[in-house]
Image: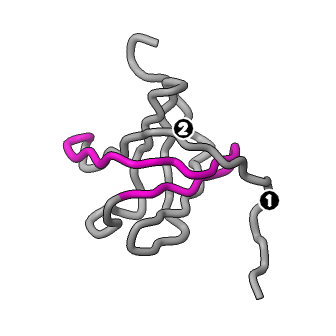
Amino acid sequence: MFIERRQVTRQNVSHVGQIFFGDCSVEVNCLVRNMSVMGALIEVALTDGIPDRFDLLLPSNGQIRSCRAVRRTRHLLGVAFDKRVNRAMDGE
């Protein structure tokens, strides 16, 4: 039996994004499958090599969110957003 532990309901979305880590030297394309103000479910080709903490760029709204992986499968990352970091892309 699955127990829902999320504090906020997530909305189904289909947003293209990029994951950045390693002083922004590594970029991984991704698809955000669902999202709330607290976190998101992110689909990638492979989660291997993606660290537990990274930045997520959402070009559709120009936001960069600092993320912490809380759940991981071969192709999916469940992340919690760091409340301290919510910034816009340069030039926005």
Q: Is residue 25 above or below residue 45?
A: above
User: Would you name the residue on which mark 2 appears?
Assistant: 85
Q: Quadrant of the N terminus?
A: bottom right
Tell me the quarter of the picture where residue 23 sits. top left
User: On the image, numbered disc 1 is attached to which residue?
Assistant: 7
Q: Are marks 2 and 1 in contact (CB under 8 Å)?
A: no
Stretch of the chain drawn in magenta? 24-44
Kind of residue at disc 2: Val
Q: Image point 55% across, 63% down: which residue?
A: 78
Q: Residue at x 47, y 72 (%)?
A: 72
Mark 1 secondary-structure assignment: loop
* Residue 25: percent from left, percent from top: 20, 42
On whether residue 28 falls in the magenta region, the answer is yes
Q: Mark 2 packing: few (<14 Cα in 10 Å), some, or many (20+)?
A: few
Q: Helix, strand or loop at disc 2?
A: strand
Residue kind at label 1, given as amino acid type:
Gln
Horizontal and vertical percent position of residue 64: 47, 34
Query: Looking at the picture, does residue 75 appear above or below residue 53?
Result: below
Which residue: 26% across, 40% down? 24
